Structures are given as C-alpha cells and as structure tokens.
C-alpha cells in the first residue's frame, strides 16, 4: 500500500543483514521504520507488538528464521549445523505469541526448506542461508498475493450488498444511494499482513472500483488497534470511515446502520470456528440477532487443519497494564503520554482473543473464494489440505 505517495509493505528485506518493519507502536501519530538484524530482535518485535496481525506475524517469523540462519552460519562447519540451530530459534519464536497459527507456519516453512537444503550433497552454510532467505521472501509474497485475492472475492460480496440496497431502497435519510456500511473489529488491514490485509482488503478493492463504502471502525480496546491503525489506514487510502466505541456496534445494527460485518481472524479451525480479537464474539452475536451478515476474511495460512474445536485454541493473556493504562498524543505539548485509567490498586484481566462459533458466521472469505464456515465448506475450497488433515486424525 502507499504512505505519503510511497509504496510500502509492512516487512521487507532491506539488505542481506537487515529486515525492516513498520513499527506500529508509533502509529497513527508517527511513521517509524525499525531495523531488525537478529532473531532475538525479531522475537522481541513480535512479543512486544512492534508488529502484530496474524499474517504479518507469520512473515516476521519466517524472516526471523532467516536471520537465525545467518547468525548460525557464521560459526557453522556445514549446512546441517545451521539446520540444527534453527530448531532452537524456532522454539524461541513460537514462544512469543501462542494464538495465531501463522507464526507456526512461518517457522516450519523455513525450518523445512533449510533441512531439505542441508540434506543435499555438498550443501554449505551459505546454501542453507540462501534457502532460508528465499523461503522467507516467498512467505511474504504469498501472504500479500493471498490478501489481494481476498480483496477480489470480498469486493463481490460488497457489490452484492450494494445492489441489494439499491433495489430495496433501504438507504438511511441523507445517505448516498447504495452506500455499503461495513463494521469491522480490530485491525485486519495491510498493517496486519505483508500487504492489502484480510478484512479491509475487500473494502479497498471495492472502493478502488468506485463502490460507495463507509466503514464503522471499532476502537478495539485495550490496545485500540481500530482507532489507531485501521482508521489511519482508511484515512491514508481516502475511504470514508467513522471511529466508534466498541460497545456501539449492537446499537448501530439495531438502527439498520450496518449492512455487513467483516472481521479478520488469528486462527480458524478446519470446522469453521474463528478465533479473533477479543470482542469479535459479541459482534457476531449482535449481527445474528439483527440479521446482519457476518463474514470473516482470512488467508488459508490462518486455517489450523489439525484443530476441529475452537475451544481448544490457546487464548493469549496479556499484561493487565494494557487495560489499566491508555496512551495517546497530548494536545498540550504534542508528546505521547501514558495515563492511568483505573484506581491504582485495581487489577485487570486482559484476554487478547475470543472464539466465534461457526454457527454465527455467514461465510469465510479466502484467497480461493467464499465458503460456508464449516468443514464441508472449507474442504470444497481446499480439498488437498482437508484430506491431509483427515488422514492425520
């Protein structure tokens, strides 16, 4: 996507020793690019949320494995030593955040490719590093392409809603004809992936085609990824949007002001249960009660084919200070300030994700099209992956 007229991805290889990322902690008030030169630095960036979002975490893990391969190669006598070192690096990266399955995918893809390279006759440490580099780049390229395809598939869904509104004359007074009001939760735009995003990709694609869209942006407490990141993305792209308090969604649906809900996902079971940012389940319940279509957009790398029940997905619990404090730009001096919201003695719980059961989901928007949120629906789009998962069960 573009920032001030310049094209960016969220993560890229600047040179053979440096991976660069957009440091999301500074948005929306400052655009900062951070250099990552070691696997340890990448692990910190993932754990401390310099970057976040399921797809981007997977890309970062792959690049982290590449950096680990470079470090190991400096003292390795052969390619096998590099492959062995990546086992430990992979364990460290996997320990950073437990919920998004993309993290595991990124680690395992690079680990597998390096093992294969090391097994070949005459393989050197440089051979292993080159293989890791190519695979990390491939993970990011694939993520961006999958998200672009999600946009194409999702734009058709939004276009159908637009045509339905025009035909039924259900526009609110004062609203442009056929405007599609999308409600989203958290940030599932290009900042959460290598590029394009999942939930926002259909919005960008529809907007670029000239479809009238407007986005209700949940603030998404406690880290306010909606208010800070989604709103910044949409403003940069010129998409009409309104930031709302998290608890406003149900009210808007009751008033007929939401035409469709689209969220992203951090992990989806092979049966269609969805794990996403905390509060997604409540939006799905409100949508179901008000007959508002509820879609989840995701690349196939977010599907956990080994898991059949959403209740078995590990839910990350983060520090209570994320709830107790808020951070923003002080208008008096133009500096970032952190303020305490609660009584100093109060503790806070901070569950980062929740589970939305497949029965509440209208459909899943993937790079291969739209499916029902069910084992059968996903199997129709991804027959090979589904068959492999059943064989393992």
Image (cartoon, rainbow, N blue to C red):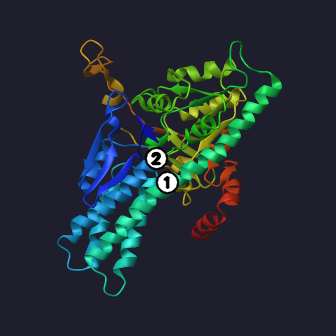
Q: Would you identify the image quadrant in which residue 121 lies? A: bottom left
Q: Is disc 1 in contact with disc 2, using a CB cutoff of under 8 Å?
A: yes
Residue for badge 1: 143
Residue 193 numbered mark, or none: 2
- In percent of width and height, residue 356 lies at 58, 40
Crowding at dot 1, Cα within 10 Å, few <14 / some 14-19 / many 20+, comes out as: many
In this rendering, position of residue 36 left or right of residue 250: left
Residue 253 in the image, given as x and y percentages of width and height: 66, 22
Q: Residue at x 63, y 31 (%)?
A: 285
| Secondary structure at numbered mark 1 | helix
Horizontal side of 375 relative to 50 (left or right) equals right
Q: Residue at x 30, y 37 (%)?
A: 32
Asked which secondary structure carries label 2, the reply is: loop
Residue 180, compared with residue 58, is above or below; it is above
- Front residue of this view, candidates 182 and 88: 182
Q: In this view, does 140 lie above or below 346?
A: below
Q: Where is residue 350 shown, x and y percent of the image?
A: 39, 33
Q: Which image quarter holds the C terminus?
A: bottom right
């Amino acid at each position: 996507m573009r920032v001030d007229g310049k094209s960016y991805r969220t993560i890229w290889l600047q040179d053979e020793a440096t991976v660069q990322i957009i440091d999301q902690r500074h948005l929306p008030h400052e655009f900062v690019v951070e250099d990552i030169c070691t696997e340890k630095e990448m692990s910190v960036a993932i754990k401390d949320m310099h970057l976040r979002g399921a797809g981007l975490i997977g890309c970062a893990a792959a690049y982290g494995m590449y950096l680990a391969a470079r470090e190991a190669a400096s003292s390795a006598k052969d390619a096998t030593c590099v492959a062995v070192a990546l086992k430990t690096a992979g364990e460290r990266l996997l320990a950073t955040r437990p919920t998004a399955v993309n993290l595991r995918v990124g680690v395992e893809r690079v680990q597998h490719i390096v093992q294969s390279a090391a097994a070949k006759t005459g393989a050197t440490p440089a051979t292993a590093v080159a293989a890791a580099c190519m695979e990390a780049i491939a993970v990011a390229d694939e993520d961006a392409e999958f998200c672009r395809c999600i946009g194409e598939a999702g734009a058709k869904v939004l276009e159908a809603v637009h045509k339905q509104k025009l035909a039924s004359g259900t526009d609110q007074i004062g609203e442009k004809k056929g405007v599609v009001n999308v409600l989203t939760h958290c940030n599932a735009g290009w900042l959460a992936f290598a590029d394009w995003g999942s939930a926002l990709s259909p919005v960008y694609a529809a907007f670029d085609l000239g479809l009238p869209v407007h986005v209700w942006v949940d603030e998404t407490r406690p880290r306010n990824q909606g208010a800070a990141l989604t709103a910044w993305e949409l403003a940069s792209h010129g998409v009409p949007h309104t930031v709302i308090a998290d608890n406003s969604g149900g009210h808007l649906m009751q008033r007929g002001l939401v035409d469709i809900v689209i969220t992203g996902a951090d992990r989806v079971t092979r049966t269609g249960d969805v794990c996403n940012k905390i509060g997604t389940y409540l939006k799905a319940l409100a949508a179901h009660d008000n007959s508002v279509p509820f879609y989840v957009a995701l690349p196939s790398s977010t599907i956990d084919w080994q898991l059949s029940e959403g209740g078995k997905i590990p839910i990350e619990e983060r520090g209570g200070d994320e709830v107790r404090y808020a951070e923003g730009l002080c208008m008096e001096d133009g500096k970032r300030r952190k303020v305490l919201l609660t009584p100093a003695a109060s503790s806070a719980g901070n569950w980062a994700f929740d589970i939305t059961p497949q029965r509440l989901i209208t459909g899943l928007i993937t790079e291969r099209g739209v499916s029902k949120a069910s084992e059968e629906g996903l199997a129709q789009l991804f027959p090979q992956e589904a068959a492999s998962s059943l064989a393992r069960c």
